[in-house]
Amino acid sequence: MLLTQTLACETVFAVLSGQNLTEALSTTWRQNPNITPQQRGAVQDIAYGTLRHLGLLEALLNTLASKPLKELELKVLLLTTLYQLQFTRAGAHAVVDHAVNVAAKIGQGKGKGLVNAVLRSFLRQKDELVAAAQKNERAKFNHPKWWMTEMKNAYPKQWQQILQANNQHPPMTLRVNRRHSNAEQYLALLSERGIAARRLSDFSIQLEKAQSVDALPHFFDGWVSVQDWGAQAAAHLLDVKDGMRVLDACAAPGGKSGHLLELADIALTAIDADSGRLKRVDDNLARLNLRATVMTADASNPAAWWDGQQFDRILADVPCSATGVARRHPDIKWLRRPEDFAEFSRQQEKMLDQLWPLVASGGKLLYATCSVFPAENRLSAEAFARRHPDARREALSSEHIPADLIDGQLLPNSEHDGFFYALFTKAI
């Protein structure tokens, strides 16, 4: 436990110092190649859990500590340990003892007594402390105040639902490859292996518990892919047909590219500015036994790569805050800043304006984000329509998408993450 606690602290410390959680965990795994799968799982649980419940944990620490802690390492140690004591089944006394041992290695070990006192005080009165802390909205909903204010203004009836959904463990959803099977047939295969699941649509399945892909029947034969149900809506809304020329403008890691190719025999070009992430597109398409033209390219600079032939369909999954997938990436809640949205909107505007001339007359462009903030969703789509009089916004409908898609917005819930879609047809 001592090693896992130490590594979890190092990971959370990196995030609270400004690094995203995915990069921080990658560094931890790279620097500790010999840890066991159990240790790896424990580190990941503590890191994710601490960031998921950071508002409450900080409120508890502020109450328990007689004065604010100047040493971030010591603060992180206490936060991760409080998470273990409140939210896991780990033995309380072992957790405290290991935390004290970790504290002995921080600085000159002067924080040992403080760590011991804070944690034992918490154990003596934790129910009362938690109840008192949750009277504060930041602690109750585990989001920054500015984020909560924006959600209240944008979604006065649903803001609590959104925040609460962000703090839950995300569902594991499968997209069934229609070239091989459908939801009902694949559910039968899962049942044979004792894996509980339910049908969301004709080609979407939600697992009762997350599984390793190794446990999924025919996964490596391309029968299913792991993809959120809300993300699956993109390919259906774009309505591709056999023979079409299609562009996936921000393709990595390739989930939507694969889905488009499953739906129709199209000529797909998949581009992304990040050459490293494009390797995942190649890997995903290879597993599905599907083919596309994959290349490193900047969607906001077509002059550098476009061959002059217009596309019948373009999927523009544009840069955004990723606030709709915060439960999968809880660091987002604490790393995002209000000023970020103006920059995302600027990037979106440039990309959309550069891509629109690439759409053929009568063709369609689907603007997509994994965000719940209107500044980079509804407002950005409306601004695009004003800039391009030949862009007609279409109603969104498909029997294969979540029924709660309203005005292009999906809010996170027990079935899917948060997404926004706006479909534009170019006038003939």
Image: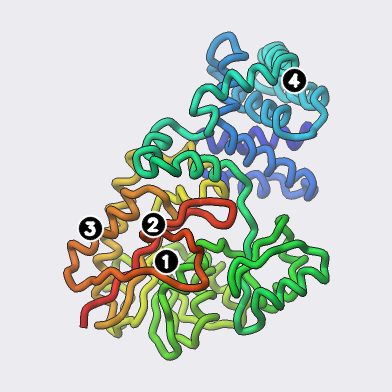
Q: Which residue is the site of mark 2?
A: 319
**Residue 329 relative to residue 237: left or right:** right
Q: Is residue 369 visible?
A: no
Mark 1, residue position? 250
Q: Give the residue at x 41% y 64%.
A: 317
Q: Residues within 10 Å of mark 2 (few under 14, many from 20)?
A: some
- Element at label 4: helix
Q: CA distance from mark 1 to mark 2?
A: 8 Å
Q: CA distance from mark 2 to mark 4?
A: 43 Å
Q: In this rendering, which labeled residue sits more in front, label 1 or label 3?
A: 3
Q: Nearer the viewer, residue 254 or 244?
A: 244
| Other residues around mark 3 within 10 Å, as few (<14) / some (14–19) / many (≥20) | few
Mark 1 to mark 4 CA distance (whole Å): 47 Å
Residue bearing the label numbered 4? 100
Q: Amino acid at mark 1?
A: Cys
Image quarter in which the C terminus is found: bottom left
Q: Which mark is residue 383?
A: 3
Give the mark nearer the N terminus: 4 vs 3. 4
| Quadrant assignment, res 117 | top right
Residue 75: image quadrant is top right
Image position of 35 with respect to 10: above or below: below
Q: Are marks 1 and 2 in contact (CB under 8 Å)?
A: yes
* Element assignment for label 3: helix
Amino acid tagged 4: Val
Q: Secondary structure at mark 2?
A: loop
The CA distance from mark 3 to mark 2 is 16 Å
